[in-house]
Image: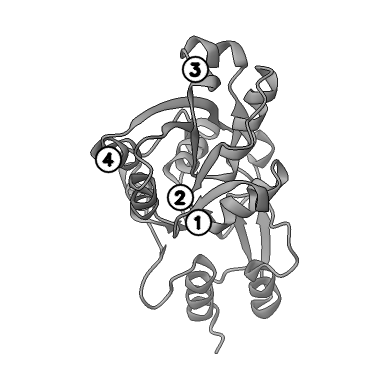
Amino acid sequence: MKVKTILVSQPAPKTETSPYFDLAEKLKVKVDFRSFIHVEGIPVKEVRAQKVDLNNYTAIILTSRNAVDHFFRIAEEMRYTVPDDMKYFCQSEAVAYYLQKYVVYRKRKIYVGSRTFPELAKLIKKHKDEKFLLPSSDKLKDLIPEELNKLGIEWKRADLYRTVMSDLSDLENVFYDILVFFSPSGIDSLFKNFPNFKQNNTRIAVFGNSTMKAVEDRGLRVDIAAPTPETPSMTMALEKYIKEVNGKK
């Protein structure tokens, strides 16, 4: 079965240089984007119920751009002025760069990890005397609290936003040759929207072991998987597969 259409379960890229656009043009396939999940802010009343007092913290641990947005949203709603000497521990350069949306970067104490949380934990360990707040979603990887607890620091988790399944009802009679998933939540959303989903000839592409497991636990077939040594990105995995089934060199 040749591939003509792909649905990526993420928002459309904001940049015109996305490798998905290159893939579509190069292999003459149609690539659509649709978020199967989205993020909603938790109301300030619910945050207060978690007994979160922003005045108690001297450092913020930021693992994503969502964490940045919702920390400053809650600060504003609580009428809390973030002090200039607040320390920010960012999991990646992308998160640290995004922080500039809210603070004057060069005038703040910002510490940047190298993408993984254990690497960031090494930086946090050097500042044991700080009182850390972790802005979080309602779904947090076990690794993060485990790493923080190992450090013997004073820290608190604050759930500031939640992952919500999107309404996909308009896709009920739309069929794609490949569906691309990046998280177990995307698979959950698929089945919440379409409880009787049958894979049939639809190919499923997954990124990461947890996503693969979520697909297989639902009794579905994984046709394309990334990352692998040969195809470290999803677009590379898609290109390899499409060339094979469409017979293009």
> Residue at (63%, 24%) from the top-left corner?
74
Q: In the rendered image, is residue 19 in sight?
A: yes
Which is nearer the N-term, disc 4 or disc 2?
A: 4
Residue 213 picture location, percent across and down: 32, 48
Q: Label 2 near label 3: C-beta < 8 Å?
A: no
Res 228 → quadrant: bottom left
Give the number of the disc on residue 199: 2
Q: Label 2 near label 1: C-beta < 8 Å?
A: yes
Return the residue at label 3.
52
In this view, the residue in front, 174 or 218, is 218
Which-is-in-front pick, marks 1 and 4?
4
Residue 12 picture location, percent across and down: 69, 54
Q: Label 4 near label 3: C-beta < 8 Å?
A: no
Residue 193 picture location, percent across and down: 55, 33
Q: Secondary structure at mark 2?
A: loop
Which-is-in-front pick, marks 3 and 4?
4
**How far apart, in angstroms, are the residues tagged by discs 4 and 2?**
45 Å
Which is nearer the N-term, disc 3 or disc 1?
A: 3
Return the residue at label 4.
151
Q: Is residue 156 left or right of residue 28?
A: left
In the image, what residue type sits under mark 2?
Gln
Q: Label 4 near label 1: C-beta < 8 Å?
A: no
Q: In the rendered image, is residue 167 in sight?
A: no
> Residue at (62%, 46%) from the top-left corner?
108
Which-is-in-front pick, marks 4 and 2?
4
**How far apart, in angstroms, are the residues tagged by discs 1 and 4?**
46 Å
Q: Where is the C terminus found, in terms of image quarters?
A: bottom right
Q: Secondary structure at mark 3?
A: loop
Which is nearer the N-term, disc 3 or disc 2?
A: 3
Is the residue 187 above or below the residue 225 in the image?
above
